[in-house]
Amino acid sequence: MKKKILSVLLTAVMVFSLTACGSSSGSASATTGTSKAEGASTGGGDQTASGDITIGVSLYDLSNEYFQYMLEGVEAEAKAQGITLSVHDQKNDENELVTGCANLIDKGVDVLIVSPCKPEVMGNIVENAHEKNIPVIILDIGDGGSDKDVIIVSDMYGGGQIAAKYALDLLKDSGAAGKDYAIIKCEESAVYAIQRGQGFDAVMSAAGYNKATEITANSDQTEGYNAMQDILASYPDIVAVFAENDNMALGAASAIEEAGKVGEILVLGFDGNESAVEAIKDGTMAATIAQQPVEIGKLGVELALQKINGQELTYDNNDTKEIYADVYLIDNTGEKNDAYKAD
Amino acid sequence: MKKKKNAIHIEYGDYGILYALLIFWIFLAITNSDFRGISFYQNILTRASLNAICGIGMTFAVISGDFDLSVASQVAFCGVILTIIIPIIGIIPSILVILAIGIAMGAFNGLLIAKLRIPAFITTLAMQMAYRALAQMINSKPVVVDNKLFKRIATYKIGGILPTAFLILIILAVIGTIILRKTKLGRNILAIGNSKEAAVISGINVPKTQILIFVLVGFFTACSSVMIVSSLGSSNYGMQVGLEFTVISSVVLGGTALAGGKGSIFNTIVAAVFLATIRSAMDSFGIDSYWQKVVEGVILVIAFSITEIRNIINNILVKQRAKKQLVSQKQTTN
């Protein structure tokens, strides 16, 4: 009798927490106002789809807006193609990444699409998937040196080029006399992010500008601020600074604001974060380059289908099996600007 | 010295969390087809084993009334070194070196706590930062392990059924339980947890015992590190951030009181499996990721208040028993 009471109490707590959450997931997505939050709710894998293809999707962290957009793209394309999805949220936890992918592989999905929170873990996952002849498609972040089938990344180098072309036009309009610019770089291990600066550099130096310096600021806003202060002290005559992500660009912008040089030095960022767009509208930043997670998600499902149908994939870079997703410029009005393209 | 057992213990032998887990598994198997295959449970057990091994050591610390916040950083420190030395000196020597490092880190923590009398909370919080910074100094880039045999340690399934990680967990848990229940050290740890003053009066060498407690934590954390690196197939100085909370939650959810004095390694393991099940199950139930975090928070609150919840249930049971006795007494007098 009493045994029952205790077990009921214990299970009631858990069952309550589960059902309570299940029923209120709809309202949660409504309150976030983005409608992307309901993404994870399709994760049951029991959807009624016309095709009998199931794709396993494991994403970095679904409470992060960027990956909600990515999932939105995956879901839209899967729906259009009649594909069943099985969605897994890594919650930015490497153990969860391993377990979740193992579950998807054991479930026998036809393709595994992963946006890994820790790329270096992908080696094991790809091996396990390939043992069961499951192709692995990586979205963004990095492949950790694994033998994946394809990785889709934003065109980082091209994004840097777009930023530089826009900067050149702005400089021409303002008639600035100086020819020096600086780059604030992400950490060395962010292999894709550091291509942004390379693209920027290539276009600027081809136009006769001179790179005064480049400083690593570990993708961090405070470090970006410190880096910019150092740059201002040593190279007061620079006309533009390109930061490889928006956090560092925002840090740099505040350093420039403090030095009273707003308008004299162009600040360009990368990522298209909301806070960066705000800064552009305030006039402290000149532009940023936005990535397209929705497109990356869609492309992932398209490639998965090609892989299932036995088609050969056409890579943008055959050695690294990379396919590039387009990026676009957010100009000094804070709006998308399609006039600038990568080479 | 025979302690008066409480009502819950008499009724359920402290297996509440085990019952909860079994009921939860049955519930999952009934409601969702994802949970009917053996592979789901294999993956859960493997995943839980990685944390639970560390939980064995943490159980000793919590029983003594302390805890160790530096375990996640210890795992990262050991992990970074492990991936560097495996290609150089081979698997078994590497594991031995890592275990030695774990013991040394634990002993250092213990020395600071016992001899310099810095509270464990402060010491291990400081060491949490220090060990991770050291790991970063050794290697700031992720390293992938290129040794198939090593990667099998945590991922192989004996006969296709029993995950090796879980087998290793059980072996270590048996060792841990023997230390806790059958040795003088185990009795001393329980005594310190019950009352430090009483332990001192009864002639227990408290500082020495405290150092040994953290040595145990360090040893089991190092074991855990080996398993985690094997399962991930890589290491990174930023790995396993937040592990200490997962581990401490499974210890307290397993019924070991944060105030110390009692606890069970077996229940810690069951609780770790329980937590791993919840984490893996939520996606399949279509719970969106914000709510998943809410659930995890609620579980943490439950875990940390479980002793009080138990006391409340216990009081209810005691009252009912008293009432029953009263009724039966009345009946006999009538």
Image (spheres, coloured by chain):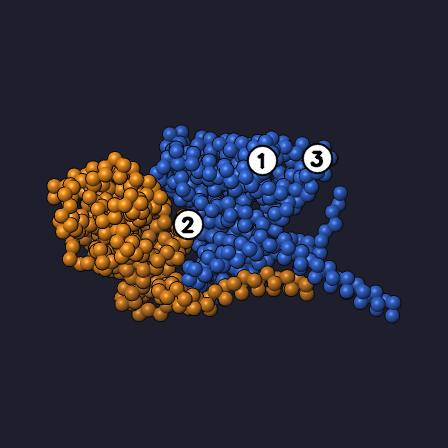
Chain colours: A orange, B blue
Q: Could you say which is closer to the camera, residue A111 or residue A72? A: A72
Q: Judging from the image, what secondary structure is the residue with disc 1 in?
A: loop
Rendered image quadrant of residue A113: bottom left
> Residue B200, which numbered label?
3
Give the image location of residue A102, x and y in percent.
40, 52
Q: Could you say which is closer to the camera, residue A253 or residue B24? A: A253
Q: Judging from the image, what secondary structure is the residue with disc 2 in?
A: loop
Measured in 3D between alpha carbons, the distance from the residue under mark 2 to the one under mark 1, in whole angstroms, is 32 Å
The disc labelled 3 sits on which kind of residue?
Val
The disc labelled 2 sits on which kind of residue?
Asp
Q: Is residue B220 visible?
A: no
Image mark 2: chain:
A
N-term-proximal mark, 1 vs 3? 1
Residue extending farthest to the front is: A260
* Local crowd size for mark 1, using a 10 Å CA cut-off: few (<14), some (14–19), many (≥20): some
The disc labelled 1 sits on which kind of residue?
Ile
Tell me: B233 left or right of B3: left
Measured in 3D between alpha carbons, the distance from the residue under mark 1 to the one under mark 3, in whole angstroms, is 18 Å
Tag 2 residue: A93
Give the image location of residue A281, x and y in percent.
27, 57
Look at the picture and state if A149 lies above or below A183: below
* Local crowd size for mark 3, using a 10 Å CA cut-off: few (<14), some (14–19), many (≥20): some
Measured in 3D between alpha carbons, the distance from the residue under mark 2 to the one under mark 3, in whole angstroms, is 43 Å
Look at the picture and state if A341 lies above or below B237: below
Image mark 3: chain:
B
In this rendering, which labeled residue sits more in front, label 1 or label 3? 1
* Local crowd size for mark 2, using a 10 Å CA cut-off: few (<14), some (14–19), many (≥20): some
> Residue B118, which numbered label?
1
For the N terminus of chain A, give its image quadrant. Answer: bottom right
Rendered image quadrant of residue B175: top right
Q: Residue at image x 44%, y 63%?
A: B287
Give the image location of residue A162, x and y in percent.
18, 51
